[in-house]
Image (spheres, rainbow, N blue to C red):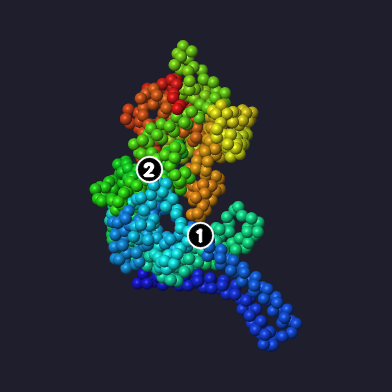
């Protein structure tokens, strides 16, 4: 009964959408109909006279203009390419067991079988209509179509090209198959690696059941109309067109927006009805297993998000992309199960058959999905290269963690050089020459009397012992004056402009980079540091005392480097993602940037932590490591140095080096010894 009610509601809403389309066509044809009546009446002499002649001429002119405008708008809507989710296609030859499972599931649900299967680097699954002629040939189920991109293509390059491939134009056979083609089943790739076969089957049941309502002609026509309007709005809003085309597009876009607003409510209710009917139909298949599987969906989403932001993002910033992200999800969630008592029992599932066994070559599919994830979430190149190479998990500590820490440490010392901070080495020991941790400690240290009078928590209302688990910027004393913040913003803007104007910044030497930093330092050094402190300023700055200026210049330097590195390094502010065709244009990537905004204090703390880790590796025998939940980590005597970050934050926030020096002494780290920066 629920299935019938949901399907009936969806069909009624689809008819409402189609009625709006019919009204729009009627409005466009109304002047022509009136003109025909007037012309016929004039021809047989019933509507004769000067007034009727003038009316016929005016109405005929209006009818011609209305027909031309209507035809133009219809052409724009018909030719506009609806957005398609970027995916990795999987042919039947590449996953015969997966296709067999989906086909059996559709038979049990008594619904049409999805026309093809594709994977997306996200924790979600849905049906996607790709029957529009702009999307190329309709997907085939024999396995010699898009799935060959995973088997016989030339490396990742061929696979990703196949993911976005479109054919020149459909032939007669394609046109006959297009109208009856079922939607494509898009599956989140993390599900295949974390879920068991039975769990995946239960999760996909309501998704596959959606092919039943989707096959109804009225619902399919309503969806095509709404997608066409949405694509027309995007097409007419695209920049870089001539004034005449832009003016015509503005009119077509206005009409498309008007129609889209008119049918928005009906389209939303139609989709709710389709979802309700599919969910009701799917209750007959593995309902009990689905309840348990939904817990795994939430867990997989949490692990995937953690893996991307904590583990994959540092590698992407270093020009490396992990080639086994989906396998990393299993390791991350297994580690979570080991640490979290709430997750106990989840690891017992690992003895069952994983869903990735349904693929013939899971490693190849994982590699293609990992590259696509880097493309979407970071904006990396579409093809591997010398500056964009895959990295295996066992290579991650050396290829990513070590290089990241030493690059951050080198940047920190480069900024100190530009600030004119001189190192006072021990003249009796020649081995203390060069970049050292002691130089940074001495510069960031605030005298105890000054901390007590100005920057210490005792002088205000701040927590004297900030919790290291607090969000960034909370519980930290001090602030940054208005003048220093203004200088910081001016430095960031000038740095981004220098990187975008010419290629000189890309080939500049370290001395030239230091000179660029000095341009902003001169403003900071001349700024009045006695301004009023504010909570918002404290969030944007680098703490009190010398940390403020250092964090401000460091922030500008990082912004300049990211702008010079290209669109893959950091998304432009306010940048919006376009349709699927714009994925081939680097300016529109990343579609879903993961890089969170970091304050000056956070940047400074990260760089100081990196320098401490370099000193620990060079003087205390520590090694870089990978924590599946926290990303890069320092292993000291085989154990994670989890107590290091809060001590660095104390130094950056309050200027008190005591806790960090105590940690260095206990760990055997020599702060006065030079560190290797490259």
Residue 621 at what x, y percent from top left?
A: 35, 25
Q: Give the total of numbered labels.
A: 2
Residue 40 at what x, y percent from top left?
A: 65, 84
**Image side of residue 427 versus residue 505, left or right:** left
Q: Secondary structure at mark 2?
A: loop
Q: Residue at x 35, y 61 (%)?
A: 141
Is the residue 205 above or below the residue 24 in the image? above
Furthest toward the right, the residue is 50
Q: Quadrant of the N terminus?
A: bottom left
Relative depth, front residue between 579 and 440: 579
Q: Residue at x 60, y 37 (%)?
A: 502
- The CA distance from mark 1 to mark 2 is 31 Å
Is the residue 65 above or below the residue 248 in the image? below
Determine whether label 1 and label 2 are within 8 Å by CB: no
**Image side of residue 68 versus residue 130, left or right:** right
Residue 92 at what x, y percent from top left?
A: 33, 57
Q: Residue at x 56, y 48 (%)?
A: 574
The residue identified by callout 1 is 81
**Image side of residue 541 versus residue 342, left or right:** right
| Labelled disc at residue 73 | none
For label 2, the crowd category at 10 Å Cα-Cα, with few meaning under 14, some 14 to 19 and many 20 or more, is: many
Asked which quadrant contains residue 325, the reply is top left
The residue identified by callout 2 is 323
Relative depth, front residue between 285 and 45: 45
Q: Can residue 111 be seen from the camera position used here? A: yes
């Amino acid at each position: 009964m629920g299935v019938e009610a949901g399907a009936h509601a969806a069909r009624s809403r689809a008819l409402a959408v189609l009625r709006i389309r019919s009204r729009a066509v009627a409005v466009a044809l109304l002047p022509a109909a009136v003109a025909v009546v007037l012309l016929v009446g004039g021809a047989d002499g019933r509507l004769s006279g000067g007034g009727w002649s003038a009316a016929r001429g005016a109405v005929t002119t209006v009818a011609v203009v209305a027909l031309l405008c209507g035809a133009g708008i219809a052409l724009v809507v018909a030719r506009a390419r609806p957005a398609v989710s970027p995916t990795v296609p999987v042919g039947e030859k590449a996953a015969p067991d997966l296709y067999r499972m989906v086909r059996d599931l559709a038979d049990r649900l008594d619904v049409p079988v999805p026309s093809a299967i594709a994977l997306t680097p996200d924790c979600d699954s849905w049906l996607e209509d790709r029957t529009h002629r702009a999307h190329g040939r309709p997907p085939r189920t024999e396995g010699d179509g898009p799935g060959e991109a995973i088997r016989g293509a030339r490396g990742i390059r061929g696979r990703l090209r196949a993911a976005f491939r479109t054919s020149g134009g459909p032939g007669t056979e394609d046109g006959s198959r297009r109208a009856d083609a079922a939607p494509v089943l898009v599956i989140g790739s993390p599900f295949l690696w974390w879920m068991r076969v039975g769990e995946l089957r239960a999760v996909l049941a309501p998704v596959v059941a959606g092919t039943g309502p989707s096959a109804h002609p009225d619902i399919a026509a309503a969806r095509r109309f709404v997608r066409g309007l949405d694509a027309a709005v995007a097409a007419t809003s695209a920049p870089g067109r001539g004034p005449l085309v832009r003016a015509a597009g503005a009119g077509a876009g206005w009409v498309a927006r008007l129609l889209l607003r008119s049918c928005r409510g009906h389209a939303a209710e139609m989709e709710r009805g389709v979802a309700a009917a599919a969910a009701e139909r799917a209750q007959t298949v593995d309902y009990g297993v689905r309840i348990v599987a939904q817990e795994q969906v939430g867990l997989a989403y949490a692990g995937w998000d953690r893996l991307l932001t904590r583990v994959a993002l540092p590698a992407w910033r270093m020009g490396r992309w992990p080639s086994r992200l989906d396998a990393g999800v299993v390791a991350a969630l297994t580690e979570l199960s080991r640490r979290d008592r709430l997750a106990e029992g989840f690891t017992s599932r690992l003895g069952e058959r994983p869903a990735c066994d349904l693929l013939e070559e899971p490693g190849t599919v994982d590699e293609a999905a990992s590259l696509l994830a880097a493309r979407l979430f970071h904006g990396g190149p579409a093809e591997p290269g010398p500056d964009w190479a895959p990295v295996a998990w066992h290579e991650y500590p050396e290829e990513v963690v070590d290089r990241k820490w030493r690059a951050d440490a080198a940047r920190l010392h480069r900024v100190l050089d530009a600030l004119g901070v001189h190192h006072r080495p021990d003249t009796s020991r020649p081995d203390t020459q060069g970049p050292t941790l002691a130089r940074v400690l001495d510069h960031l240290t605030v005298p105890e009397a000054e901390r007590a009078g100005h920057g210490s928590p005792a002088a205000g209302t701040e927590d004297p012992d900030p919790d290291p688990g607090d969000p960034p910027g909370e519980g930290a004393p001090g602030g940054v004056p208005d003048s220093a913040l203004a200088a910081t913003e001016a430095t960031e803007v000038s740095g981004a402009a220098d990187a975008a104007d010419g290629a000189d910044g890309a080939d500049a030497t370290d001395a030239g980079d230091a000179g660029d930093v000095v341009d902003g330092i001169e403003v900071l050094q001349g700024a009045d540091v006695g301004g009023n402190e504010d909570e918002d300023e404290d969030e944007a700055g680098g703490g009190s005392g010398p940390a403020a200026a250092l964090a401000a210049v460091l922030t500008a330097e990082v912004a300049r480097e990211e702008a010079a590195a290209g669109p893959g390094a950091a998304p432009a502010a306010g940048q919006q993602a376009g349709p699927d065709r714009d994925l081939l244009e680097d300016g529109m990537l990343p579609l879903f940037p993961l890089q969170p905004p970091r304050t000056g204090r956070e940047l400074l703390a990260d760089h100081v932590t990196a320098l401490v880790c370099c000193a620990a590796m060079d003087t205390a025998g520590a090694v870089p490591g990978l924590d599946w939940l926290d990303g890069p980590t320092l292993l000291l005597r085989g154990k994670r140095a989890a107590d290091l970050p809060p001590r660095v934050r104390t130094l950056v926030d309050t200027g008190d080096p005591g806790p960090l020096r105590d940690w260095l002494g206990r760990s055997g780290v020599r702060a006065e010894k030079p560190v290797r920066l490259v």
